[in-house]
Image (cartoon, grey):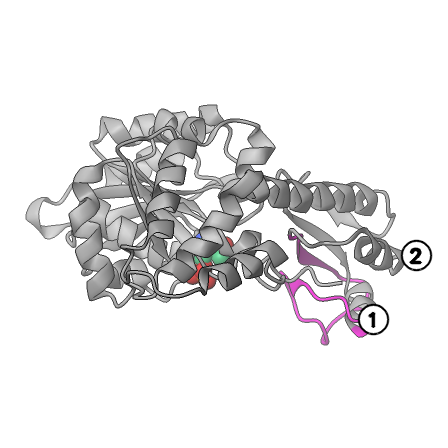
Amino acid sequence: MNFASDNTAPVHPSVLQALAAANEGYAMSYGADPLTLSVQDQIREIFEAPDAAVYLVATGTTANALSLACLGAPWQTVFCHRHAHIQEDECGAPEFFSGGAKLTLVDGAHGKIDPDALKLAILGEQTRGVHGVQRGPLSITQTSEKGTVYSLGELKALTTMAATYGMPVHMDGSRFANALVSLGCTPAEMTWKAGIDAVSFGGTKNGLMGVEAVILFDAEKAWEFELRRKRAGHLFSKHRYLAAQMDAYLKGGLWLDMAKHANATCFDLADKLSKKSNVRVHTTPQANILFADWSRATHQKLHEAGAAYYLWSGDLDAGDPDEMLAARIVCDWSASADDSAAFLALFD
Ligand SMILES: *Cc1c(COP(=O)(O)O)cnc(C)c1O
């Protein structure tokens, strides 16, 4: 019963098989191997973006920080949601790798940037001449940190506003696949056709050992990205082992199947939890994350029974047993129906 995060899950077996298969003989280093070149082509094809620059890195933090560094300048500010991963969980990496860019935090319900709040935030920057930071990229998280998904219309509204002010747009797609299968659109529709300039295309949270792709739709940024990646110490020499994972991920649509399974498990869990009298599900999940409240006493019971998830508010041990506290439940590609059933039974 592990719902702590989708990166607590194992690696899909076919990814490990692909790693073993890639482990034959010699291959050119630093991304000059045939598998890396093939994976780059496959991603260009999947995104219907023949001219895009595609790179592999090992963490989402790297993908986000290096993409944002390429889209902006050190004297600019990156607009993002108040609870964006780049703000709360990357230890200042975007600021560091950009050479000191600032983050401007924008509000919005359910983890999504509110367009009116974004407009106010944009109008509030670049107003102090040489004394203030200049407007830089907008970063949107799809699937959001709250497990919600921006519709294509919502994405377009934000990217259109960004374009009005000459700002490029980055998508943190650590859970890209979960959002994509939720919307049922194409990767192109959710990215460049919706006004996105660069994507951190996640793999690790969806069954890989540790690979994310960076896709730059403006290939003019390619050389700068390569220099920044090397300088950051993130140019893997034995690149074929990153490529082998991504190759297995894309093969036969495995990435989409894994995301569909994770989402379906989450929808089913939310549905069944919402029928329990002692549970309050926050909003109907749109991908593989749900938030819900139940009492401290129930949290303690679940905890003792070995259920793993993050307590999203309050203290597990100290306080009124009846006080309602929030839980974050994340479902992954390997989630089993038996685990869900065992978890749900603990509420009776
Ligand atoms: C997990 C996650 C990342 C990437 O995190 P790493 O630990 O650096 O791989 C980026 N953005 C979001 C929204 C995430 O949830």
Q: Amino acid at mark 1?
A: Ala
Residue lying furthest left in this view? 130
Residue at image mark 1: 305
Residue lying furthest front in this view? 25
Q: Nearer the viewer, residue 163 or 298?
A: 163
Q: Which corner quadrant holds the N terminus?
A: bottom right
Q: Which mark, residue 348?
A: 2
Q: Residue at x 71, y 63 (%)?
A: 2
Say whether residue 1 is left or right of residue 221. right
For numbered disc 1, what is the local secondary structure? loop
**On screen, residue 309 above or below 49:** below
**Is residue 143 visible to the viewer in this orientation of the structure?**
no
**On screen, residue 79 above or below 239:** above
As for residue 311 lying within the magenta part, the answer is yes
Q: Which residues are magenta?
A: 304-332
Q: Residue at x 81, y 51 (%)?
A: 337
How far across and down, in percent of the image, does residue 311 sit? 66, 64
Say whether residue 262 is left or right of residue 67. right
Q: Which corner quadrant holds the C terminus?
A: bottom right
How far across and down, in percent of the image, does residue 106 sit? 38, 44
Between disc 1 and disc 2, the foreground one is 1
As for residue 272 lying within the magenta part, the answer is no
Say whether residue 23 is left or right of residue 30. right
How far across and down, in percent of the image, does residue 314 sit? 65, 66
Q: Nearer the viewer, residue 40 or 196?
A: 40
Q: Amino acid at mark 2?
A: Asp
Q: Residue at x 57, y 28 (%)?
A: 184
Q: Say whether disc 1 or disc 2 marks the residue closer to the N-terminus.
A: 1
